[in-house]
């Protein structure tokens, strides 16, 4: 278990405070942490960027995760995984997110 947590730390906790101070990464189950070891750094960075943008846009509007998930037509738990960079996001999901947030899909990928 320690090696899994070490891997998670090396992947994300070093930069977590820069973009996701509201997330408790230590609360993630070990099975989730193991899965992240197999994700390429580029794919994980894209997930993080989308999560960061979705979170910021949602907060600007003052919506809860549940409200946004309902607007997007996504299950609440899947929406949470998107915001925590854990979901393997499809183009359909990006389309639903952008429609629900009222932005272009490209806005979700911007740095």
Image (tube, rainbow, N blue to C red):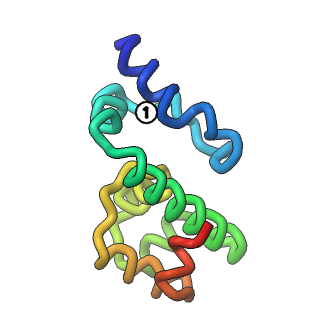
Question: Which quadrant does the N terminus fall into?
Answer: top left
Q: Residues within 10 Å of mark 1 (few under 14, many from 20)?
A: few
* Residue at 41% in and 62% down: 79
* Residue at 66% in and 66% down: 56
With respect to residue 17, does 45 lie above or below? below
* Residue at 31% in and 76% down: 91
On screen, residue 2 versus residue 110, left or right, reads left
On screen, residue 55 versus residue 80, left or right, reads right
With respect to residue 32, does 87 lie above or below? below
Question: Quick one: SS at disc 1?
Answer: loop
Judge by depth and name the residue closer to the eye, 23 or 37. 37
Q: How many marks?
A: 1
The percent coordinates of residue 76 (x first, y second) are 39, 62
Query: Residue 32: which quarter of the image?
Result: top left
Q: Which residue is tagged 1?
A: 28
* Residue at 50% in and 64% down: 50
On screen, residue 23 versus residue 71, left or right, reads right
The percent coordinates of residue 90 (x first, y second) are 29, 69
């Amino acid at each position: 278990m320690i090696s899994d947590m070490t891997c998670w730390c090396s992947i994300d906790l070093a930069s977590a405070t820069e973009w996701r101070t509201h997330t408790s990464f230590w609360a993630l189950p070990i099975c989730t942490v193991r899965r992240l070891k197999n994700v390429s750094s580029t794919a994980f960075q894209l997930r993080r960027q989308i999560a960061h943008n979705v979170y910021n846009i949602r907060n600007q509007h003052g919506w809860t995760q549940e409200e946004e998930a309902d607007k997007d037509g996504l299950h609440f738990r899947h929406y949470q995984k998107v915001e925590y960079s854990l979901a393997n996001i499809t183009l359909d999901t990006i389309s639903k997110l952008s429609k629900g947030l009222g932005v272009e899909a490209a806005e979700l990928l911007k740095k």
